[in-house]
Amino acid sequence: MIELVERHGISWKGKDVVVVGRGVTVGRAIGSLLTRREFNATVTLTHTGTVDLDAHLRRADVIVAAAGVPSLVTPENVKPGAVVLDVGVSRVTDPESGRSRIAGDVDPAVAEVASWISPNPGGVGPMTRALLLKNVVDTASRTA
């Protein structure tokens, strides 16, 4: 996720980052990582029980949505020009087809408000797989 944002020319330094989700895998981990000197972001860790979550989201320069609640982040609670990363994963039933599909925490309409969005599916996941493959190749090269 860090590299995905940086490869799009976006710096973390000085950014007000709101992380929605308290899970160990993304929520707490990314919050801790982004406060390191090399990133120097100000991080607010929130969750679905946070009082006035919308106010926190509207203030954020960067939103990392990882709560597992479909369409939790809507255009109304995103500051214009914010960067939005959708890491949340939920399974929902498509009303048209009746089939199950993966949905993220960010409403697709947020793309109209955000300066840049990493959707789910299709954003962080493919980058994660690409970097894992890169690590395998790098390790194989060092041991060959």
Image: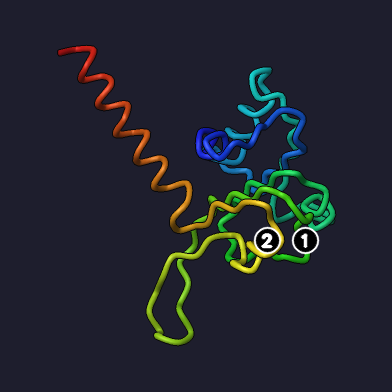
Q: Position of residue 21 (x, y in %)?
A: 63, 47
- For the point 77% across and 38% down, the residue is 16
| Residue on which disc 1 sits | 77
The residue lying toward the viewer, choosing from 72 and 139, is 139
Q: Is residue 16 above or below residue 136?
A: below
Q: Position of residue 116 (x, y in %)?
A: 62, 51
* Count of numbered badges drawn on the protein: 2
Specify the label residue 73 is tagged with. Answer: 2
Q: Is residue 70 above or below residue 132?
A: below
Specify the label residue 107 is tagged with. Answer: none
Is the C-beta separation of discs 1 and 2 under 8 Å? Answer: yes
Quadrant of the frame with the C terminus: top left
Q: In terms of secondary structure, where does tag 2 sit?
A: loop
| Image side of residue 128 versus residue 7, left or right | left
| Image side of residue 34 versus residue 57, left or right | left
What kind of residue is marked 1? Asn
Q: Quadrant of residue 44?
A: top right
